[in-house]
Image (tube, grey):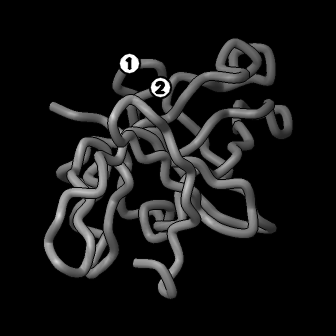
Amino acid sequence: MSRLLIAKISKPQGIHGEVKCHVLTDILAVFDGKIKDFYVNEKLMHAEKVCYRQGAVYIKFSGINSRNEAEVLRNLDIKLEKEILNKFVGDKILVDDLIGMNLLDEKGDFVGQIVDFENYGSADILTILENEHEYQVPFIKQIF
């Protein structure tokens, strides 16, 4: 099963084993507390409590009951199975689905293949490979 990166644990929070996470998705509904099982560096872990506040996610995992135990999780990735994430997507497109797709112009002619995606804050950037040349193009409505 395919897993997608949704957050990164940044540090322990408090003394009871909670961790603060940097959010790496714009699908914030996955942090509404309904999902309880996440993959932390490929290990399935159960969340006792999940909340989103002030731009960060705070998670209390089962079996992590002290600041020292939470410290071991620092800088680890939090992933979610793609099938679960798809339930929250609605009409949005997952970046993972764009990678590898062929890009066509309005006439249907091949332009290139999407090989990478980055976000630098102001706009999402697609990297397109065409005849061994890479081009970076902003993923905005005026172009696509």
User: Label 2: how many residues lie within 10 Å, few (<14), some (14-19) or many (20+)?
Assistant: some
Which sits in the foreground, 81 or 101?
A: 101
Q: Is residue 48 visible?
A: no
Identify the residue under disc 2: 40
Where does the N terminus fall, quadrant-wise? top left
Q: Which mark is residue 144?
A: none
Q: Could you say where residue 46 lies in the image, as x and y percent from the top left?
A: 40, 36
Q: Residue at point 49% right, 38% down?
A: 134
| 43 shown above or below 7 | above
Q: Marks 2 and 1: CB-CB under 8 Å?
A: yes
How far, Cα to Cα, is label 2 from label 1? 5 Å
Q: Is residue 82 visible?
A: yes
Residue marked by disc 1: 43
Q: Position of residue 59 (x, y in %)?
A: 61, 45
Examine the image and state in which quarter residue 115 appears.
Answer: top left
**Does 115 sit left or right of 87 as displayed?**
right
**25 or 58, which is in the foreground?**
25
Give neighbour class at mark 1: few <14, some 14-19, many 20+ (Cα, 10 Å): few
Residue 58, x across and y down, in percent:
67, 50
Q: Quadrant of the C terminus?
A: bottom left
Amino acid beneath label 2: Val
Q: Amino acid at mark 1?
A: Lys
> Is label 2 in a helix, a strand or a loop?
strand
